[in-house]
Amino acid sequence: MTAFPEPARTLWTAYADSRRRPRRIQALGVEHRQAARRLVAAPPEVVPDRESRDAYVRRSREMIYVCPWETRLRSWLAFERFRERTAAAVAASFVPPIVAERAAGEFERWKRTGRGLDPHIQTSTWHVPAAWFVPFAASERCLMLGAPGTGYRKPAEGLHEHAGRGPTTAAPARTLIYVTSMSEARRRVADAIPVVRGGLPSGEAVPLAAGRLETLGRWLAGFHPHALVELDYGGLVHLLDDAALRADESVAETSVALAGMRRGEAELAVAMYERLLARWRPVRALESAN
């Protein structure tokens, strides 16, 4: 909280204490439903008219951590990527050109205000980029399972709000999340960059790119040194059953692969990367499934 200047610090402090804000265990679902309602409207609302006043809140050791949703900025950035990667005729099937041009024009005007373009939340669709596993350790995983397809346990199994204050009657969301300190995240990324840049002695390709790690490192450097960093699987948990989530060791495999590269053990590194790719290949394939 101390990283925010006034009056944002006072506003976020009041928000964190509010009983009306979405609880942490429900917030991801709330954010998703809001986005879905905007996109199924006629015409679709690809970018909300106003910036979100919501945030993810975590309390740890008497410290309040706040991660603003910044839905408007993230929607602009996502829509910009969508237009860059999609043929104009195909994009028009999703968003009428007049709506697309209006959103793009508003974003250009917003950019000219000089505000930063690095949101508190980075988003990826249909998979977790390999570089995002690097800042974390296997022991930093928090897994909560629910009924596949619903994302929730029975109400009787309700737990305390995740890293929050007091009890809640809501059921815990189906979640896979890693949490680490900013200092650890930065150190692990910085240590991995020269290892990945050096590559494997055999010359085989690896799913990690030094450039992407450097981009991740620069993004992490923009936040308070005592902040926390989270990797949230988000809606991907609904594409995997309980056994698959329990068996997901992507962070551990990435760590072992990097250790193998560091020691020149190419076979170990390749084996770990192949396990990582084999896990995510069928998930990513769903993006183009009919």
Image: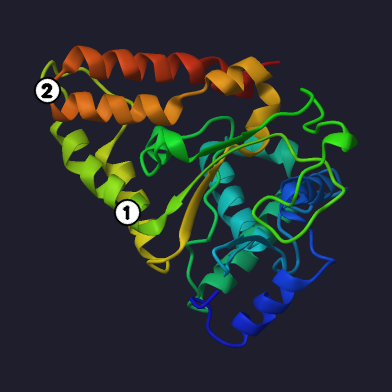
Q: Determine which residue is flagged by label 1.
A: 186
Crowd tier of the residue under label 1, counting other residues whose Cα lies within 10 Å: few below 14, some 14–19, many 20 or above: many
Amino acid type, residue under disc 2 in the picture: Gly
Q: Is residue 96 visible?
A: no
Dot 2 corresponds to which residue?
Answer: 264
Colour scheme of the picture? rainbow
Residue at 73 percent of width and 44 percent of height: 95
Q: Rate crowding at label 2 as few (under 14), some (14 to 19) or many (20 or more) other CA atoms within 10 Å.
A: some
The answer to whether residue 13 shows anywhere in this view is yes
Dot 2 lies on which element? loop
Q: Quick one: quadrant of the N terminus? A: bottom right
Instruction: Please name the amino acid that badge 1 sits on.
Output: Arg
Above or below: residue 241 compared with residue 207: above
**Position above or below: 201 against 137:** above
Q: Residue furthest bottom?
A: 6
Counting from the top left corner in percent of width and height, residue 135 is at 37, 44
Left or right: 152, with 116 as reference point: right
Picture quadrant of residue 254: top left
Look at the image and tell me in which quarter the C terminus lies. Answer: top right
Tell me where residue 112 appears, x and y as whole percent: 51, 76
Q: Are marks 1 and 2 in contact (CB under 8 Å)?
A: no
- Nearest to the observer: residue 43 or residue 31: 31
Give whichever of 105, 33 is nearer the camera.
33
Locate residue 83 relative to residue 38 in the image: left or right.
Answer: left
Q: In the rendering, at what x and y percent does residue 21 appear?
A: 79, 64
Picture residue at 10% right of the left edge, 20% below the top: 201
Residue shown at the point (71%, 57%) measured from the top left:
47
